[in-house]
Image: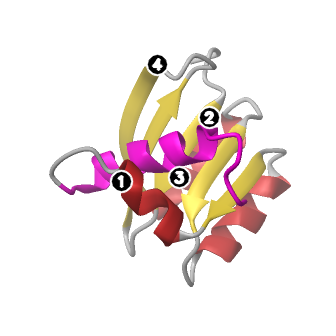
Amino acid sequence: MDTVTLVGIDLGKHRFHLHGQDKRGKAVFRKKLSRKQLVEFFSTFHPCTEAMETCAGAHHTARLLASFGHNVKLISPQFVRPFVKSNKNDFVDAEAICEAACRPAMHL
């Protein structure tokens, strides 16, 4: 897990879906966490970049993760939509967020 450089987070009301990848874009992990588990996970995880779609709760979550030393990027949902590869589910959305955040010309 030390090779993880980017984590895409699909935000939900009660569950968060995470997709972690290394600097080459290879998937390292996929997790489904509750709100409490998310805080515990990132409080002990090494500092890296987290990307998530902007929504009502994204700013609160971004401030929380930034307090742990992480670099947080918020992406507008309209820029994530083109990167969804197949059937829509939360893990695919988290992967699409990572893909969108990797683009050099992405508006963050």
Of badges 3 and 4, nearer the viewer stands: 4
Q: CA distance from mark 2 to mark 4?
A: 10 Å
Q: CA distance from mark 3 to mark 4?
A: 22 Å
The numbered dot on residue 26 is 4
Q: Quick check: can you spot residue 17?
A: no
Kindly identify the amino acid type of the residue bearing the numbered disc 1: Asp
Percent across and percent down for residue 95 are 40, 42
* Mark 1 or mark 2: whose residue is earlier in sequence: 2
Task: Count neighbours of disc 3 (C-alpha within 10 A) and say few if under 14, some if 14 to 19, many if 20 or more.
Answer: some
From the viewer's perspective, tell me whether residue 30 is left or right of residue 80.
Answer: left
Q: Is residue 65 left or right of residue 78?
A: right
Choose the circle earlier in sequence order: 3 or 4: 4
Q: Secondary structure at mark 2?
A: strand
> Which label number is shown at residue 38?
3
**Prevailing secondary structure of the magenta residues:** helix
The residue drawn where x is 61% and y is 38% is: 102
